[in-house]
Amino acid sequence: MNDTARLLRAGAAVWWRDFVAWRKFWRSSILLNFGEPLTNLLALGVGLGAYVAVMQGVSFLQFIAPGLLAVTAMNAVTFDAGFETYDKLNSSGVYAAMLTSPLTVPEIVLGEYLWEATRAILYGAVFFLVILAFGLVHSWWSLLLPVPLVLFGVLFTAPALYVAAVARTHEQLFYYFSLVITPMFMFSGVFFPVTHLPWIVQDIIYILPLYHGVVLARAMVLGQMGPGVLWQFVWLIGYAALLAYLPVRALARRLTT
Amino acid sequence: MRSRRVRERLFRIKEFAPGGGNGYIESRRKELVSVASDFGLARGAQDLPREVIVARGLEKTYGDVHAVRGVDFTIRRGECFAFLGPNGAGKSSTIRMLSCLSPVSGGQLTVLSLAADIGERRIKERLGIVSQDDNVDPDLSLMENLLVYARYFGMPAAEAVRHAEQLLTFMQLEGRSKAAVRELSGGMRRRLVIARALMHRPDILVLDEPTTGLDPQARLLVWGAVGQLKLQGVTIVLTTHYMDEAERLADRLVVMDHGRILQEDAPRPLIERTVGREAVEIWQQPGEDDQTFIAAAGDGLILSDRHGDTLVLYSAEPGRIGQAFAVRGLAPSRMLVRPTNLEDVFLTLTGRDLRE
């Protein structure tokens, strides 16, 4: 069998394991990943939105909805990849068992990307249905949302896997969540346009991957697609490509001593 | 054709049965043989090389720690080969290297004629690995555990379902296929790991301390299954620190300590060569002296060993020491005469000090 086919089949086997485990708890899992962005949408969009008349030409609720979709996907991927991977490494021995089969560490990592990309699309889609019901979707371009979500499945999974591989305790995982993910959530242009911020701050925000996901999601949902949007894709693809191999060595170090 | 082979195998049970003797085990074994033969658990070993695992000067280092210091061994097709040793002897490191779970630090290691460091994938396709920690997947049911694992090997789904059902029966887990792994006892988890390791019909089954922590009934079941798979032509590699287990299951064994192999042989010859056939244990009473007994035992004595208040005298011929004592009118107040066993060999070779 040629290498690509083998790699994909192996990745699909790992994906299948995660799917079988997930489908037992899918209801509570969706509810858990759904509560927070929905709360944000209602409390901030509807509540705070009553005091914020217009933001970049649309209502505040309309402004934050696509960004929250991107955040939902990021969180669905990050927390699952972080916690599940930590447990697979440290308590359940799921990865150790995989390595008694012909599966290799790169194949396992690929499988996790495939699974987290699936989750990103799935949880993004559920949130999409909500904003659709709120009448906040305005363009058929929205059908392209799975593309950035799949990229999220790689670029946010990779660092989470890496952190899970190097973390010695559960608490250390939270460092990553609270020092990296939460600030990114706050400053990636979900709640306010970044254009009025000082240049230096804008430059920093511009290197955050979530920012490009938010801009892209907003452009798709509002139908404001233009050639500039291509740059957001380039950033997301670049991040995914750059980070994809990051967890492989860290996991291999943990698993094959 | 198949049924004839099965009959022949059944016919040979007695002569294969390690240790022999135990009626219950024998009957369990026969029962399981018929079950497993019907299922075709093994692929049949005809196409395998005669020497399935060969290690020469094999070494393992972790940083400054030299866990395995150049060991040589050859495991033959169809046999049960055991690694014995106290904790930290290097047996798990060795078995992890031959399972391709841990890179070789030095020396040569070939498994099924493939070098362990480059043939990893192809070796793992033909190895069933039961590791020490029962790493069954806690999020999946028993059946799902087996089916998901079969996918890692690219096994067709329909075949996997059929084989998984057979294996659950074989390990006496039938009727629990939908149960959650979290509900299983330790013994059931171990049986599930063994069933899982057999999903892809491996040629070699590697068991790292397979019965540690199991109750006597579960141990019997595991032993029955192992003996049974051996009859099917599966090569068994095992580590243990239960001497009765090694004596019962192993065709050949090595005793390891401090990363080296101290002795290698079949259990019985190894026992007789090292500690003879009979052990006389004397609990020392006030006024009794080691030297008196050792001198009295005369040329019947192979070896003497003292631990705590017990003196153990080993003799090549049963009854010889007792006779010698009688001739000299010696009657130790507390004495036990018993056949030698692997434990004597083990303690003689590796000493009585605690390792941890």
Image (tube, coloured by chain):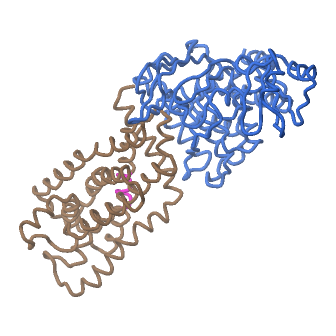
Chain colours: A brown, B blue
Q: Nearer the viewer, residue B338 or B50?
A: B338
Who's the residue at 42% across and 27% down the image?
Answer: B104
* Above/below status of A132 relative to A173: below
Residue A5 is situated, as x and y percent measured from the top left of the image, at 37, 32
* Above/below status of B256 relative to A103: above
Who's the residue at 87% across and 18% down the image?
Answer: B320
Q: Is any part of residue B169 visible from this angle?
A: yes
Q: Taking A238 as reference, is A73 left or right?
A: right
Q: Is any part of residue B38 visible from this angle?
A: no
Q: Nearer the viewer, residue B94 or A93?
A: B94
Q: Taking B155 as reference, is A111 left or right?
A: left
Who's the residue at 38% across and 40% down the image?
Answer: A252
Residue A102 is situated, as x and y percent measured from the top left of the image, at 46, 32
Residue B254 is situated, as x and y percent measured from the top left of the image, at 61, 23
Quarter holding the N terminus of chain A is top left
* Above/below status of A202 relative to A135: above
Residue B12 is situated, as x and y percent measured from the top left of the image, at 78, 16
- Looking at the image, which residue sits at the far bottom? A51
Helix, strand or loop for the magenta stretch, by majority: helix
Magenta region: A116-123
Quarter holding the C terminus of chain A is top left
Q: Is residue A2 magenta?
A: no
